[in-house]
Amino acid sequence: MYPDLNGKTAIITGSSKGIGASIALRFAQEGINIVLNYNSDKQGADDIVAQITAKGGRAIAVQGDVSKEGVADTLIKAALDNFGRLDIFVNNAGMEHPAHTHEMTLENWQKVIDVNLTGVFLGARAALQYFVDNNIKGNIINMSSVHEQIPWPRFAHYAASKGGVKLFNETIAMEYARQGIRVNAIGPGAINTPINKEKMNDPEQKAALEAIIPMGYAGEPEVVANAAAWLASDESSYVTGITLFVDGGMTLYPAFMNNG
Ligand code: NAI
Ligand code: BGC
């Protein structure tokens, strides 16, 4: 537990399920007021709100597509109207739509870049604007991936978006460091969420995935939420501009594990 988080307010994009939902639940345990965001899964977001309020926490759910201009401002307005403050903005929403590059449509490319990269820019820009205008030493967390570093065939748009998040994250961390605003990314490896459901339900694909994880298993979303709580807290007060990999060792060149 991180006592400095108690009473703060966080916005978490794409938090109706998966990693975002797990961060919302973990943050609420810390006493943080939560603004959940969903695009289409209202039921999922309402369920998380209900779980938080049942335990005495405070949470609301707000609809919005993060790739659209103005949505981040709506989320911030909701945070201020309901909880009177904003301290933490988590750009978590993301998507995949695999295709071989020579067959990838512009529409597919654009959609993934719009959500995973432009969405992060729009969320961070709105949060920075609010923090700067109000002289708040705010905290921004951007959800990257091991694929900000590891190339991934059939996911060229996804890897390009996460590579973009890496340098965007580093750049704004530097740009706003003197204002006391911290900006960090998390780079999850394979995490057991709806995005990986198909792979995890197929024994062959699951084994192939586990073979490239030195620790030998996919992580649960809670391990990513733990990293987010630490990055949001004062325990990480001298940390900015990093990508914290939470990947069971996936970025350690696992092909070398039995080589030599
Ligand atoms: P998920 O598919 O379970 O959840 C993604 C969430 O983002 C969903 O709630 C979805 O509705 C939301 N979302 C998608 N497009 C949106 C939009 N335009 N506006 C608002 N919300 C939108 O996936 P998961 O695994 O929870 O992924 C969360 C983040 O973590 C993503 O950025 C993903 O790239 C990243 N990540 C996930 C890994 C994994 O193995 N699960 C590994 C590395 C990174
Ligand atoms: C993807 C997952 C994948 C993991 C490891 C993440 O960015 O969203 O689908 O399992 O990287 O490849």
Image (cartoon, rainbow, N blue to C red):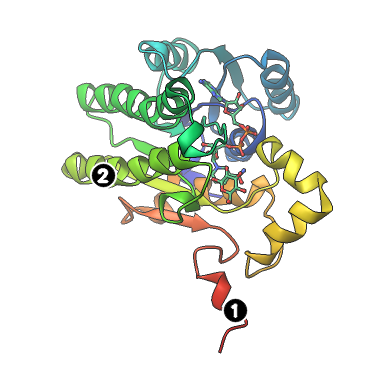
Q: Quadrant of the C terminus?
A: bottom right
**For residue 125, side relative to residue 253 (left or right):** left
Residue neighbourhood size for the residue with mark 1, other residues' Cα within 10 Å, grouped as few (<14), some (14–19), many (≥20): few
Asked if residue 35 is positioned above or below residue 145 in the image, the reply reads: above
Numbered disc 2: secondary structure: helix
Q: Circle 1 is placed at which residue position?
A: 257
Q: Which residue occupies the foreground of this view, 8 or 221?
A: 221
Asked if residue 170 is positioned above or below residue 77 in the image, the reply reads: below
Q: Circle 2 is placed at which residue position?
A: 173
Q: How many marks?
A: 2
Q: Which residue occupies the foreground of this view, 260 or 180?
A: 260
* Among the 4 quarters of the image, the one containing residue 259: bottom right
Which residue is drawn at the image coordinates 70% and 61% (left, top)? 210
* Among the 4 quarters of the image, the one containing residue 98: top right
Which residue is drawn at the image coordinates 35% and 12% (left, top)? 69
Residue 234 visible in this rendered orientation of the protein: yes
Q: Amino acid at mark 2?
A: Ala
Q: Amino acid at mark 1?
A: Met
Residue neighbourhood size for the residue with mark 2, other residues' Cα within 10 Å, grouped as few (<14), some (14–19), many (≥20): many
Query: Mark 2: is the Cβ under 8 angstroms from ligand 1?
Result: no
**For residue 56, side relative to residue 110 (left or right):** right
Contact (Cβ within 8 Å) of mark 2 with mark 1: no
Give percent across and percent down for residue 258.
62, 82
Q: Which residue occupies the foreground of this view, 221 or 230?
A: 221
* Residue furthest out toward the front: 102
Give percent across and percent down for residue 169.
31, 43
